[in-house]
Image (tube, helix red, strand yellow):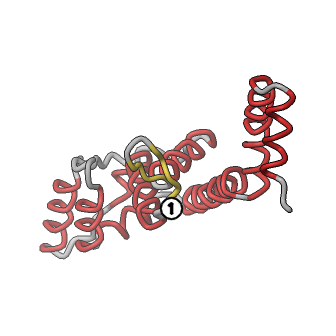
Amino acid sequence: MTVNELIEKYNEAKKTNRKYDFSKHIKNTYLPYSRKIAIAKRALRATSFKEVGHFEFYEQDTPIMMLLFTVALIEEYTDIEFEHTDNYSIEYDMLAASGVLEGIIAAIPEKEMDICDGIRKMVKDDFMVNTRSLVSFLETHSQSWQTAIDSLTAQLNGNDLKSLVESLSVK
């Protein structure tokens, strides 16, 4: 069911003072742990870097990460399909404004939502420690620095190396 179709059905029920049963849209009450991790990693990766030319720079966009994570969970746990995959915020805002988002989230088992949120936080923490800390930077780049130094040393003869070291020395 598309977001538009769901909102229409919800509004029809609301007009006739009927309570809408969001639980009928639940297709999964449990996702495998590995799937939860994959969803969190995909949302994090999609919102952690910015491409400028041929380079990729770190730039965290946490609000969009939460949007992508929430949309992914809705799609995984329910039969609801988002059509505007180039801009999920359009349909997310439609769901939120109509009151449907709250009903859908409440229909997904609370324990599952708590576990997914915990995994999202762990994935983000791991990412920060593994890629953004000084220790990880030094560990990641120490081998490439050693390779560059070895290559430079091999290309220079003894006299060139001595003059290079002297020119770099602090006096």
Above or below residue 78? Residue 95 is below
- For badge 1, the amino acid type reads Gln
Point 84% across, 31% down: residue: 159
Point 13% across, 66% down: residue: 12
Q: Who is closer to the viewer here, 7 or 155?
A: 155
Point 46% across, 63% down: residue: 61
Residue 145: quarter of image: top right
Residue 34: quarter of image: top right
Label 1: how many Cα within 10 Å (few below 14, some 14–19, many 20+)? some
Q: Who is closer to the viewer here, 76 or 72?
A: 72
Q: Who is closer to the viewer here, 26 or 69?
A: 69
Q: Residue 158's x, y, as percent?
A: 87, 28
Q: How many marks?
A: 1
Residue bearing mark 1 = 60
Q: Residue 93's x, y, as percent?
A: 26, 68
Taking the image as shown, residue 47 lies to the left or right of residue 17, namely right
Residue 102: quarter of image: bottom left
Q: Residue 53's x, y, as percent?
A: 37, 45
Quadrant housing the C terminus:
bottom right
Q: Who is closer to the viewer here, 97 or 51?
A: 51
Helix, strand or loop for disc 1: loop
Taking the image as shown, residue 42 lies to the left or right of residue 159, namely left
Point 46% across, 59% down: residue: 65
Above or below residue 124? Residue 151 is above
Q: Residue 19's x, y, as percent?
A: 27, 70
